[in-house]
Amino acid sequence: MIPSPPRPSSLGVLSPSRALAAAVAASVLLAAVDLATGVGAVAVHAATAVAAYLAAGAGALSAASAYRRGDHLRRAWALIGLDNLALAGGRLLLSHDLFGLPAGPLANGLLAAATVLSNAFGLWGMVLFASTWLWTGLPLPSTGRRVATVIVPLAAISLLAVGPDLLEMGTRAAHGDVVALSYALGDACDVAVFLLVVPVFLTARALKGGTLAWPFGLISASCLAWLLLDGGTALAEVAGSWSAVAQAVLALLRNLACLLIVAAAVAQRLAIRARPR
Amino acid sequence: MTAELPHEIIAERLAAYLGPNTAQVAVRTFAERACGRPPPELTREDLPRLLEALRPMLRTLLGGDGAEDVLRQLSEDLR
């Protein structure tokens, strides 16, 4: 007799949907802490940002550790983990005065290095996630024309979101500002990452109804939060509005971007650890 | 609905991970690629080749250990 099909998505109390709910709740809580203490409280703002990045880094590395050495998604998750750990380092360096590191070439050089590393890790990781479907050997789930109809508008939106900062940082970089150069490279990487969301999302959609849809879907959602964060930051700069509420909303988007990675990592671990009965 | 034919059993097992549509696509794709015939025409002798053909896809998505577990379970279910 054939046993009933497995339901590997729920192991004990953990499930992808609960991980998603926890990620959203924790993002709101962290943003509320920011707002309640006044976003001007530099130390609190830095601490909540670093906490979100560290959580994403630890979650992604945990997902990587569930795979064997040489597995495709082990590398992808490890790179996303390193990306977030470098972001945490960069955020700490932005607040270097809080822990006694004087402003100057050393702090700037370290900040630029952390920014370049985080973007390189993030882009490479997303390339691996986006190429996962190709490695399965399955026929492509969408036609090139359908992909183009999504990618073209997404490219335009990404450029609108990142463009103002890219222009400003590019101008400053042209005058020898190393940190601005790293930020400009980061903006360019952001656009590439936003475009790579399309194959990642299509992978999630193709896997709909299976446990493996969750990690790819949540990674796509995380990237969408990053896109909204970049767009929101550009809007705030254009409008010249940096109210506490605006900053809290941006902090919420950053927290979501990070903690959705944690939820994706939990979903990935659940999918791998599940065993057919 | 309970699966009875070998390709239905495999698709049903894989659906938990890949979703029902992609599970069917996977069985069809690798049956034709490895055995040269559509899933309903598979014989018992074809099944080891089909399972072997599924291995790289499962390794990519579930990792080496996860893939071996799924393949082991499938082999048992198909006995």
Image (cartoon, rainbow, N blue to C red):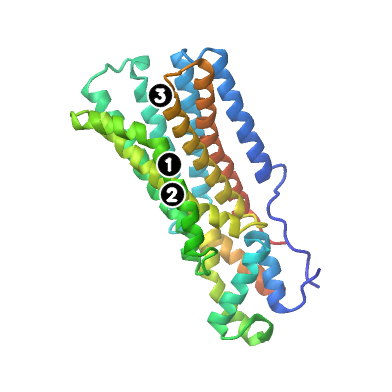
Instruction: Identify the residue position indicated by label 3 in the image.
Output: A237
Subunit that carries the residue with mark 1: A
Earlier residue among tags 1 and 3: 1
Q: What element carries label 2?
A: helix
Instruction: Identify the residue position indicated by label 1 in the image.
Output: A158
Q: Is mark 3 on a helix, strand or loop?
A: helix
Name which residue type carries label 2: Leu
Tag 1 and tag 3 share a subunit: yes
Earlier residue among tags 2 and 1: 1
Looking at the image, the residue that sits furthest to the left is: A175
- Residue A14 is situated, as x and y percent measured from the top left of the image, at 68, 43
- Residue A106 is situated, as x and y percent measured from the top left of the image, at 23, 24
User: Looking at the image, can residue A218 be seen?
Assistant: yes
- Between marks 3 and 2, how big is the CA–CA gap? 24 Å
Q: Do the residues labelled 2 and 1 touch (CB within 8 Å)?
A: yes
Instruction: Identify the residue position indicated by label 2 in the image.
Output: A195
Q: In this view, does A193 lie above or below A205?
A: above
